[in-house]
Amino acid sequence: MLTHVATFAIYGLEPRRVWVEVDIRPGLPSFAVVGLADKAVREARERVRAALLNSGFEFPMRRITANLAPAYLRKAGPSYDLGLAIGILAASGQLEAEPLERFAVFGELGLGGELRPCRGVLAVAEGARAIGPSGLLVARAQAAEAALVEGVTVAGVENLREAVEVLGGERQAPPPMPGSGLAAVDPRAQAADLVDVRGHPAPRRALEVTAAGGHNLLMEGPPGTGKTMLARRLPSILPPLTVHEAIEVTRIRSVAGLHGGGGLIRERPFRAPHHTISPSGLVGGGSLPVPGEATLAHLGVLFLDELSEFPRPSLEALRQPLEDGHVTVVRGQHASVFPTSVMLVASTNPCPCGFAGAGDERCRCSEGEITRHRRRLSGPLLDRIDLLVDVQRPTATELAGPAHEDSVTVRARVVAARERQSTRLAATGAACNGQLDAGQVRATVHAEPAARRALLEAYDRGRLSARGHHRVLRVAQTVADLDAADLVSRRHVLTALSMRGHDGSEALAA
């Protein structure tokens, strides 16, 4: 007898429907799994056999052939166990086949028949809603996560016996506990608050502009001056995730196996990979493409500490994802697209020892060593960074002085600026100024004549590239949004130029 059971594969971030076709015929006892399956899927034969027997079912001592269709799609992981077991039960007459038309199944089986969670269940639920069937049978621990997708009937079960009883109509699966929804994150409840930062008025301002416009930021300064401290407080002043964004972030973390189940992730991601990371680890890849750190930081912050220590191939691989907001990984006949809409925040030392320009005599690096150190960061990569700020150690008076604004206060201004951008950029598809391309900058940024003259003078006399010219104008628009100004003024342009590091300083001086 031949039966079909619907399940799903995760390829990249997208669900692909897979049909588990099981055929049982007389012959020497055997169990073959075909359909471009990896070792984990082939090992499912022993898990399924033990799970069936230990759950009180019969394992047919006949010739069993299971095909995972389509055959051209590589199958990996243990998530096909439940589909194989249900297919064998239906093909051997121990379960009616009719309910299988209404349900897809997804999960790993233990030897005792218990159903274990598998990563990517939120994406699987979205696939079930898009292409059917209308029901989804998953491990009970993941039922709440799958139920975040509306339009799909989710049944969470503990083991194979419960799954068969639910499919056969003998048991009603308890409704999954709905997620707690999307509540605003209160920065006061976060451990990292901007009020902890003493001194650093210019870097604090740059951090606020970064959050308001979704810009990229590079902080340069000696070790121990607070660069990492500032970066880790950026999420506390970012706008809260919308429902759509929260589902997107939750799906990415679910596919990566970093979501513990339950409700939506309500905080913007913050990822800080080690400087030994490979290009595929940073932007995604592998024989079966998996998301990299840039995708795990999607809609949040990607922090690269000690930027000059990262391998050059890894940094160069990051250039296009920063520009396009996505990266395409091609493997064989398939292409996976991973979103990479991130705010890149990086820190670096000015020289190998870290103390060049610190105002003391601790630096012993030669000019040649400093030059070689700076050359480790390519010009094209630096050109994709909007703000370059100098972070020096605060004075004793600043450390002992009163605290500055907390994250709640700063975040209110950031949210107001983002709302202005949302209204102005509604027709462009961009969410913030940092996502505007050159054409959109020309169409949406309205500057006073004096502001444009100041920018052109800086371009002619300074070292701004054409891309840098547009990036300065984008930052100036964000400064204007924070000031609730309708037009970009000369002061806004000069403020943006002052946040361009050495290039902006030379342009201003000229």
Image (tube, rainbow, N blue to C red):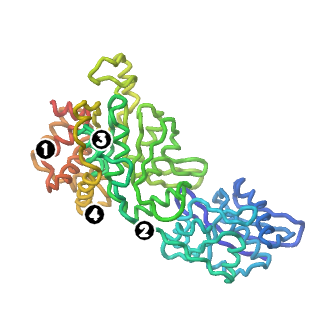
Q: Where is residue 377, by image quadrant? A: top left
Q: Which residue is mark 1?
A: 491
Callout 2 environment at 10 Å: few (<14), some (14 to 19), or many (20+)?
Answer: few
Pointers 3 and 1 in contact (CB under 8 A)? no
SS for callout 2: loop
Residue type at the position of mark 1:
Arg
Q: Which residue is mark 2?
A: 181
Callout 3 environment at 10 Å: few (<14), some (14 to 19), or many (20+)?
Answer: many
Of badges 3 and 2, nearer the viewer stands 3
Of badges 4 and 3, nearer the viewer stands 3
Give the image location of residue 501, x and y in percent.
26, 34
Identity of the residue drawn at 34% across and 58% down: 186
SS for callout 3: loop
- What is the distance, in whole Å, between disc 1 and disc 4 at their CAs? 26 Å
Q: Is residue 406 visible?
A: yes
Of badges 3 and 1, nearer the viewer stands 3
Residue type at the position of mark 3:
Val
Identity of the residue drawn at 66% across and 69% down: 158
Q: Earlier in the sequence, mark 4 or mark 3?
A: 3
Residue type at the position of mark 4:
Ala
Pointers 2 and 4 in contact (CB under 8 A)? no
From this view, report whether residue 280 is shown above or below residue 111: above
- What is the distance, in whole Å, between disc 3 and disc 1 at their CAs? 26 Å
Label disc, if present, on residue 197 of the rendered structure: 3
Q: Farthest residue in the right direction? A: 28
Q: Which residue is mark 4?
A: 426
Residue type at the position of mark 2:
Gly
Left or right: 338 as drawn, with respect to 457: right
